[in-house]
Amino acid sequence: MDKGRLLEAEIVAGRRNPSVYSNLSEGMSYYEIKKQTELAIDVDNMPAIQGMAISNKFAVAEALNSKKGYTMIARRASKGDNSAPELFFMLRTALDDRMRPVFRRLARQVIMTTATGITSQGIRGEVYEQAEYEIGHDEFDLDETMERFLENRSRILNTEDIVSLERKERMKTAVLMFDTSGSLYGERFTTAALTVAVMAHNLSRDNFSVILFNTKAYVIKRMKEKLNSDELINRILESESAGYTNISEGLRYGGLELDKIKKRNKFGVIVTDGAFNRGGDPRQLLKYFPKLHVISLPSKHDWGRRVCKDLARLGRGKYAEVSSHKQIPRILMKLLREL
């Protein structure tokens, strides 16, 4: 059986591994990959489309530039399927000017819907301050109230004796630095977009900045910049990708953004595997951060994990290790709740 018929058989069978389709479609003509992609659309086989996109993203993009192609992606996006944003990352440079914003919108839809399921606005750290009692207050400092009552040597508790507690929001200033190097089929960029969406939800009334870094660092959102969630996610969906890991530049850019706000409750969160191969040792950049929290990505390099642990320890921050990129948004949400 030739490769074309074998690929067709695998598409109909519905194999789940994109690399199977990538290997079988390697070396095939533009026309043949486009034809096989149309078959994958008919049988709703997304792994096949992703695999063939590795071989020829332009042929796959043209096949998806149809009513059937759009309907398939839209249906998956409506169910919150991450394959929609992952495919957008793979094809974004191949999509034409008409389809690119359409597929970007579907990718953004999945990211925002998923982020809303992970977090909600209003979950924030709070502090309490003492205040004079007013009708309607329902939280009190009992120890201080009792001390005042005893000092007045009265048998009757007066309103002047009652010490109320008022909730005050703990304003935060944060910078998120996300390692997008070595991106596989858009998975890391999809996770980055979802992680940023979670952060934007949680810190919607705070000061925060977003940095993506690979070979170079990119400021996606500046500290004092007012930006709605759609535009923020669009910037990530359209951001640059590269294969190297320059943690030092990510920390340097993040530190400069953090320095723009002169407040106490400031911290950085870096998401990386620690295996830097550009920019030098990042542990020299910790001077920029009052606190640096680290979410450690899966890595083949034990020394990278040690770098991550050092960054958290020397940065006086929390350390969390994930076994899958999918865990990162929830780990970040948990971290932000505790700060």
Image: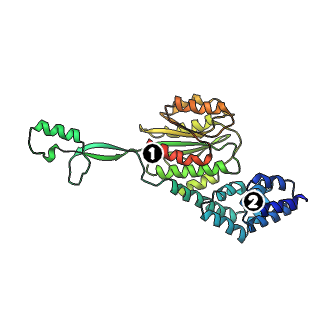
For residue 121, which quarter of the picture? bottom left
Query: Can you give x and y, in whole percent of width and height, for residue 322 in the image?
Result: 59, 42
Near mark 1 (Cα within 10 A), the count class, few <14, some 14-19 or many ≥20, is: few
Vertical side of 132 occupied by 110: above or below: below
Query: Can you give x and y, in whole percent of width and height, for residue 162 in the image?
Result: 18, 45
Residue type, numbered disc 1: Arg
Towards the viewer: 300 or 245:
300
Residue at the spot 84% in from the left edge and 53% down from the top edge:
26
Residue with the most extreme right position: 1
Looking at the image, can residue 304 be seen? Answer: yes
Q: Which mark is residue 49?
A: 2
For residue 147, which quarter of the picture? top left
Helix, strand or loop for disc 2: helix
Q: Which mark is residue 162?
A: none
Towards the viewer: 188 or 264:
188
| Residue hosting label 1 | 337
Residue at the spot 60% in from the left edge and 53% down from the top edge:
235
Towards the viewer: 128 or 99:
128
Which numbered disc, 2 or 1, marks the residue that appears first in the sequence? 2
Mark 2 touching mark 1, by CB under 8 A? no
Vertical side of 99 occupied by 276: above or below: above
Report how far apart the C-alphas of labels 2 and 1 lie in the structure: 39 Å
Vertical side of 221 occupied by 98: above or below: below
